[in-house]
Image (cartoon, rainbow, N blue to C red):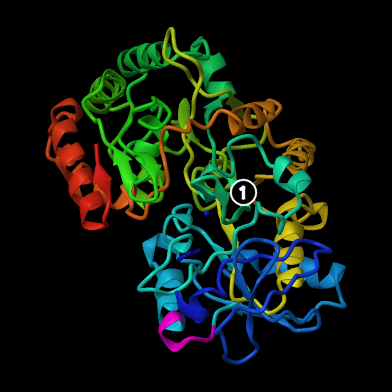
Amino acid sequence: MVLNRHVGCTERRMRLMGGVGAVAIALTLAGCGGSGGSSVGSYGFPQVTQDDKAAITVWVDADRSGAADAFKKANPDVKVNVVTYDGSANGSNSFRTKVQLFDRAGSGWPDVVFSTQNNDAAWASQKSNGKQAFAAVLNSGLVPKSTLDGFTQGSLAPCTVEGKVYCLRNDLAQVALWYNKDLLDKFGYSLPTTWEEYQALGEKAAKEHPGYIVGAAGDSFAPEIYFWSGKCQANGITGPTSVTVDTESTECKRVASMLDVLIKNGTVPNLSVFTPEFVKKYTGKVLLMPGPAWYAGAIFNNPQSLNVPAGQLGVAAPLAWQGDSPATGNVGGGTWFVSSHSKNLKAAEKFVEFVTTADDYQVNVAPGYPAYASAAEKWVKKQESSGYYATDLQALIKAGSQIWTGWGSGVFSQEAIWAKTITPAIAGGKNLVDLLPEWGTAIKNQAQVNGYTVK
């Protein structure tokens, strides 16, 4: 379902993206020399002399190579050099590392980069060691406002730092409630609409149908499914270097208490959904499972995983706590960046706008739920027409605009903290409620190591 950003004349070249049809307006910088020259354009940041005929270099992961192919087919007049890399997957941080090397060398930056990570805007928007930020600002005229307004509400939050947009979202990974309609009907269970009802169903299933499950808590992204959806302020990014961490709030405790009950009775096992053990033990045994949009293809409709037969899998809107408004978390989704160093911002902007909004890619080719609203609606209709699902998929559209904004996208990895601090402790029999202070301390320590002021 799944970039970086980071003064002198070199530094002043970096914060730019070319709007479709936009003409770079160059103002000569006093005292600035160097190859190609440097200018402050109408987008408010320094840029090198533009060349509308220059080829652009685009970095994609293997799964996004189809995006580059679709763009080249639709725009044969634009010269594109495609480079495949790991997309910074699994926290490799390769995008940031490579940009730091280019910063030192003063050259080599790609024009466009795709990343599987949502926290790259936190660093790519900032100057690093006196060097200009890598990411171009997109909402100062580079990308048309009408395009930016077309993204699903809240979807550009991970790309936005202090009111400036530094990337475009490729896809969303909103959490919804997946369920097996046949099993619920067979056992006479009603579909829960609140987390309290969800817990009650888990307790009932443990007694009446032991071995069946209602979720899983063994993955590093478990906090994004349960705690983010529960409005637990463990990751309240409030600025480029500020974060609020309150893991002992009522919102955090209610989630932890629920999971303690369901982990203990076996209906939410502390086991990764990607392990052979999980597949062997729980194929045909999943009653419910809160999880991201990409669970449909990666977990359920996958011969190498749970392989749920056609006509059984349904999806419902995110659960809410009683008396609280609905909210959900987000587990991944990719981002596209334009380099502020690009010599052809016009072509770079045209590329990122195409791959995030055009039906030729997002509807016809893309495997994940598009972040662009109109493309998402068409994508959902296409999935529904497959005949695989037991329900329509409108709940995914609803969930897409209910991602809680109180959980931010900082430089540090919440998933890495959880995997190191909490997962082994749960395996050792400890209660999540008792672990909340330890989790909070681990987050604060990691945030401070990365230069954050913690509240």
Asked which quadrant contains residue 425, the reply is: top left
331 is higher (above) or lower (below) than 232:
below
417 is higher (above) or lower (below) than 136:
above
Write down the region rendered in magenta.
Answer: 103-108
Question: What amino acid does circle 1 point to?
Answer: Asp
Asked which quadrant contains residue 195, the reply is: top left
Q: Which residue is mark 1?
A: 171
Residue lying at 50% horizontally and 63% vertically, measured from the top left: 3
Return the residue found at the far front.
30
Return the residue found at the far bottom.
35
53 is higher (above) or lower (below) than 350:
below
Please state if 434 lies on the left or on the right of 321 as rendered: left
User: What is the x, y in percent for residue 111?
Assistant: 63, 74
- The reply to whether residue 356 is visible in this rendering is yes
User: What is the x, y in percent for residue 303?
Assistant: 56, 50
Please state if 344 lies on the left or on the right of 212 as rendered: right
Foreground pick, 147 / 228 = 147
Foreground pick, 73 / 305 = 73
Instruction: Judge whether residue 105 is colored magenta.
Output: yes
Please state if 222 lies on the left or on the right of 340 as rendered: left
User: What is the x, y in percent for residue 319?
Assistant: 48, 20
